Amino acid sequence: GRPDRPCRFFVPRSIFFESLPAFEEIPVVKEVFSATGISPLDLLDLGARAISPYPPEIFALFAGPGGTGKSTITGLLAIIIGDDNVARPSQRAFAEAEILRGIASLENKLLAVIDDVDGDILGDFGATIKELATSEKITGRKVYASPTTFLNSAIIIAATNAVLRRVDHSTGFYDRCRVHVLGKRLRFTKNEIVDVVEAWAKREDELSAILSWFVLGALQRRIKKMWPKRQNPEEAREILDAICSSECAFVWESLEASSEDMVTWEEIEGLWQHEK
């Protein structure tokens, strides 16, 4: 920052570009991929959009059954960019009657995490997804206060283990809704997830390297007008078609990945018919 243009955000980490290891080779990044299945490119893209002063251009949704690492990923992002830069509003704050209050919670934040949303989250946001993803300035109102307009700097990440319902099938919606399906169950309790994130928090050099890559991704957006990963509307459409189905809910809740055991299609069909 400068005296005439002070910094809007304080991120409690170092940034360096000399001798910066490849992003996918940073041990914490490897561990996140191994534990949750989220790719290094997806993690880099989310981090770059969070650290950038520009509108994020997407709304991110982590979908999957319980214990697949949704809180682990958002916890890592929070310790990298600083917890003071993270908002944690409720889904209810973005319902139609409360939407201005929900938007107000995003002021001067880089990341907003909405945990445990239900299947109506896409309907609650509706056209607001497009505004919050792309508008340079947005308007909110805190309780008992007048509306205020501020720069749009926060990427919203919602996490759900519910079967989703859609109300918007437009191309503009698919351009902005980035869905990450997490299907790899972690062998962690909630307390153990906290322990994992706290253990990562002590690895300062690695977290600073990750932040440095986030900054490079944000600079790429400024200079080349492109993010590390481009949204594919058709891919988003196909993913949402799959996870907005009862079959998806059955697979999430009844099966888990295993490198040692195998289930035949006949057994899966039998389980499905029993559930129905």
Image (tube, grey):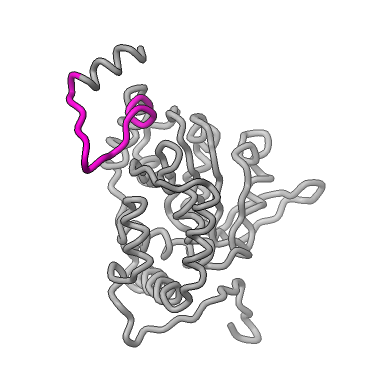
Residue drawn at x 38%, y 66% is 28
At horizontal 51% and vertical 30% (from top left) the residue drawn is 120
Residue 34, how many percent across, how many down? Answer: 31, 56
Q: Residue at x 60, y 74 (%)?
A: 10
Q: Which residues are magenta?
A: 249-266
Q: Is residue 262 left or right of residue 217?
A: left
State which quarter of the image contains the C terminus.
top left
In the rendered image, the residue lying farthest to the front is: 260
In this picture, residue 15 sits left or right of residue 145: left
Q: Residue at x 35, y 61 (%)?
A: 31
Please say whether residue 109 is one of the residues in the magenta stretch.
Answer: no
Residue 255, position as x, y percentages in the image: 32, 31
Indicate the quadrant where residue 270 lies: top left
- Residue 149, percent from left and from top: 66, 56
**Magenta segment: does it hold 252?**
yes
Q: Position of residue 151 (x, y in %)?
A: 59, 62
Against 66, residue 215 (above or below) is: below
Which residue appears farthest toward the right when viewing the image?
144
